[in-house]
Amino acid sequence: MNAQTQILPTSMPRSPSVTTTTRGPTAHELYQLIKHEQLTALFQPVVDLRSAEVVGYEGLIRGPSDSQLHAPGKLFKAARQAGLIYELENLCGKVIVERFVESKLPGTLFINISPDLLLLHDVRTRHVFGFLRQLALDPARVVIELSETDSGYDFRLEILGRALERYRALGYRIAIDDWGGRPEELASLAAIAPDYLKIDRHFIQNIDTDAIKRRYVRQLLEQARALGWQTMAEGIESHSELTQVTTLGIVFGQGYHLGRPSLSPSAVLSADVIRTLAPQPPLPTGRDECCIIEHRLLIRAAPVTPDTPNCTLFDRFEVDPDLNAIAVVKDDQPVGLVNRHALIDRLARPYHLELFGRRPCAIFMDPEPLLVDKNLSLQQLSYLVAGADRRHLSNGFIITEEGRYLGIGTGHDLIREITDLQIQAARYANPLTQLPGNVPINERINQLLARRLPFVACYCDLDHFKPFNDVYGFSRGDELIRLTGKLLLESCHPEHDFLGHIGGDDFIALFRTPDWESRCQQTLERFGTEVAGFFNPEDQERGGYLTENRRGEKEFHPLTTLSIGAVVVPPGLFSSYMEISQAASETKKMAKRQAGNSLYINRRDYAHRSGGPHAHQP
């Protein structure tokens, strides 16, 4: 029996629950659609939000574009009414799997299968997995997404769990799709033990402005982590939603902002998304990070087409000993990369030049080269290369501009630039805390201002630190400064925020995370707890200590506390780090007027005038 007759029933459906009234034009159209396999598979990227890497694709289905069954909602509703739901689901699986393999998409395939289909013991329900085996798709590359039924997730969990054990033993992973129940209800899914929990798009939409949704998602994440499940956010539609999702600690994400469903989806995220997700450089280099790839790494080597003979590339490599690779381009789009050593090694073997010299270079190219947008920073590029397959470091990478071929880059040049970055970082680091010093702080502020990115500048200072140094010694004082730097650094999001050490007991934190205020408050609480160990019991009991001033008089000094002055910096209202520094210094003074560990937030508007920003009354 061929694949088509395996999927289709031998005649129109005869389920007792379906009467002849349901066999109108829509039912007949659906039957013809299934018979002739008139479905299209689209794929939407699934992104690891920690590494800014596309790790897989969810397979989605569409009906004919000129049909009322084009939208998946109408398609599946019609199938249920016509009694063809299982035939349709099997065909969807077949089309998605075939297209995924045919397109040679990397990573994991996420495929939706209804729990009811998995529970059936009819031979029809095993076709999806038959296609997976037939097309030699490794089960370790497949995640079975359990679609929600009409009755929600209240299906036969224990029976389903036992059915899933068979698939899990073969290497498949399991995901719960569109979860929107209460966090405490997650424990009821223990029988299924999913690897992934996909949070319904309803709770991701506007999560950056909806505190109730953020609270719900935080509770959900706590429960999922306790159960050992990975979390995934669906429906990320905007930059601010993406920022909030990553701040909350959700591991994976999907949505139009990351990548739309497509017949041929990209394996590389946009430069804007990567800039949001990938870590910013720990220390600016003083060069324009957005142009460093184009100006220092780009090699404008002429590409070839897939049908160019191998001997042509061989000749080019012989003529140009510095050429490490040649890009293969079709219609201005990169489709592969031919490495110098790999090609020469193959054609240098006996008779291989005669056998393969006239054949197209596509047979020897790497069909999945690393594609890099020219606007990425050096740090973002190094992050991508480090997280990708190791062959990309030796093969090199293709540099693109809006997806079009621009040139190539080499791993050797990338390592050279990274080394320069590290040398510069060490040059400007504070020797006590190893945090960035004044030069990189100022450069980072200017970068944020130039890119018109909103941020919050927090000037952090220890109160009554000099008398502490006088009483307890400079070595103990250095320990207290290191503790302060450690606590502040731990309050910063490693991928979005920045902490610098101005000198002495002064620090500057530049926050881009939306929950910066709670991060500062948590730091103050932790400092209040940990600083107590720096004082002897007598000083702790009386809340301070005595020192002698220059006139020989005894003075009482309170215990050391931490003050943070925060300036909210909207885009376009400051022009340089000097203006930010002045505003932050004034705000820090206000914070130090408050007793104890304190945070003072300056939310005033600023207007440009000569000599710097001037505060207006709120």
Image (spheres, rainbow, N blue to C red):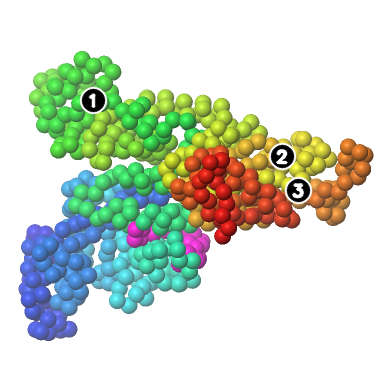
Q: Residue at x 24, y 41 (%)?
A: 403
Q: CA distance from mark 1 to mark 3?
A: 61 Å
Say whether residue 226 is magenta. yes
- Residue 300's place in the image compared with 531, above or below, is above
Whole-percent x, y for residue 463 in the image: 73, 47
Per the picture, the main secondary structure of the magenta-coloured stretch is helix
Q: Nearer the viewer, residue 357 or 210?
A: 210
How many numbered badges does the structure rendering display? Answer: 3
User: In the image, what residue type sits under mark 2?
Assistant: Glu
Name the element at disc 3.
loop
Whole-percent x, y for residue 352 in the image: 14, 22
The residue singled out by tag 3 in the image is 560
The residue singled out by tag 1 in the image is 301
Judge whether residue 11 can be spotted in this image.
yes
Q: Nearer the viewer, mark 2 or mark 3?
A: 3
Judge whether residue 522 can be spotted in this image.
no
The residue singled out by tag 2 in the image is 479
Q: CA distance from mark 1 to mark 2?
A: 54 Å
- Left or right of 367 in this view: 155: right
Q: Nearer the viewer, residue 272 or 94?
A: 272
Name the element at disc 2.
helix
The residue at the far front in this view is 610
- Residue 251's place in the image compared with 160, above or below, is above
Give the extent of the magenta segment.
213-237
User: In the image, what residue type sits under mark 1?
Assistant: Ala
- Left or right of 610 in this view: 264: left
Q: CA distance from mark 2 to mark 3?
A: 13 Å
